[in-house]
Image: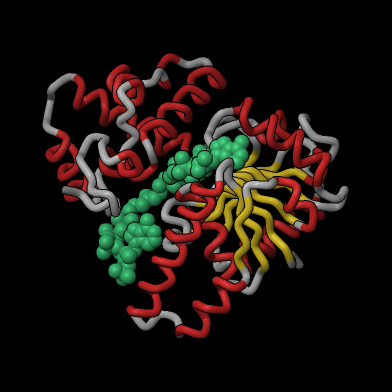
Amino acid sequence: MVETLGVVGAGQMGAGIAQIAAQAGINVILSDVSDDLCRRGLDGIRRLLDRSVERGRITPALRDAAVARLRVTMRLEELSDADFVIEAIVEREEAKTALFRRLDGICGTDTIFASNTSSISVTRMAASTRRADRFIGMHFMNPVPIMKLVEIIRGLGTSDATLAVTQDLAALLGKETILVQDSPGFAVNRVLLPMINEAVFVLQEGLATAEDIDTGMKLGTNQPMGPLELADLVGLDTCLYIMEVLHQGLGDSKYRPCPLLRKYVDAGYFGQKSGRGFYLYDERGKRR
Ligand code: CAA
Ligand code: NAD
């Protein structure tokens, strides 16, 4: 049973994971690289909890109890008390392995490390620590408080005990799980990201407007969001990095990132989080 959860990265995924864990009665230490980013993560969680109170989904007392279980810090050393740590930082392998190496020296030997990576090898990240048996992929979906799935990825050395603790944690957080072997993009993003990337090719080739591509996929295939608005929600930087992992890892040209996707990322158009992607957004992330 996880009592204290460390979450590293207070962006959209880390904040979401911290929120649902605090609501499930777990003490959470949420960390990012600056006080400002930590504060922003916490403010976002507070806003969503307030909205849940307004909507009558939780009582004010439950909201206050969840907030009281959340601590934010930019000092990674404060995660030394955590018995389970979930990493949710940028989708770059060097950044993640550098972080896990540091955490390996900070946390107790029994602490389990999980990565929320969308695509990167769990086995390779585990090899940067001395606890490959206590290392696992725990891939939440965005938005975390709403989406039902956690994809669990077993690295080569992941032990049965680590898998069992992770499955129990996911259940406590109210999630359904699927179990997938370690391979670039695992199962969900191996299917989803090529679709998003192909939608960007359709846009790049001028075959239809962004709105028409999205409307076509929404009304034509019953998806809640079109692929381009979904890419804006995920983050175009994250979409590009996942495509790069698929392309390099699987070695098939069908996974090459669309040049227009790369161009948008080069321009700083990261989607909802930067105010501009395929669409424009206000400061609260609402479509203009
Ligand atoms: N965080 C928390 N709650 C959110 C939210 C967010 N980012 N976005 C929307 N919600 C909430 C809204 O507040 C609303 O709740 P209320 O009842 O309080 O109003 C509820 O969700 C429904 O929202 P909306 O009415 O605004 O819009 P909607 O009905 O279209 O639902 C959606 C929004 C749930 C995001 C829906 O469009 C959807 O399911 N989209 C697809 C999401 C998806 O495919 N996610 C997977 C992405 S891929 C991934 O995560 C893996 C990866 O590695 C990239
Ligand atoms: P984000 O850009 O919203 O947030 C990332 C956060 O990590 C930022 O606040 C950044 O400051 C912080 N960070 C970067 N390096 C750090 C470090 N060394 N130490 C501490 N904090 C650091 O990104 P996100 O969308 O939350 O994605 C985070 C992870 O979750 C990525 O691996 C991504 O692939 C994965 N993921 C994303 C989605 C999605 O739809 N966005 C879905 C599932 C999984």
Left/right placement of residue 255 relative to residue 164 reads left
Q: Which of 141 and 219 lies nearest the eye of the viewer?
A: 141
**Picture residue at 65% right of the left edge, 58% below the top:** 29
Residue at the extreme right of the image, as rendered: 109
Left/right placement of residue 157 relative to residue 194 reads right
Residue 263: give x, y in percent of width and height: 30, 19
Kindly indicate the quadrant of the structure image that contains residue 94. Answer: top right
Left/right placement of residue 275 relative to residue 256 reads left
Q: Which of 4 and 136 lies nearest the eye of the viewer?
A: 4
Residue 174: give x, y in percent of width and height: 55, 68
**Picture residue at 24% right of the left edge, 53% below the top:** 286
**Picture residue at 38% right of the left edge, 21% below the top:** 257
Q: Is residue 187 above or below residue 68?
A: above
Q: In which quarter of the image is the N terminus?
A: bottom right
Image quarter for ligand 1 equals: bottom left
Kindly indicate the quadrant of the structure image that contains residue 120. Answer: top right
**Picture residue at 27% right of the left edge, 41% below the top:** 275
Left/right placement of residue 88 relative to residue 267 reads right
Residue 80: give x, y in percent of width and height: 79, 52
Tell me, yes or no, if residue 186 can be seen here: no
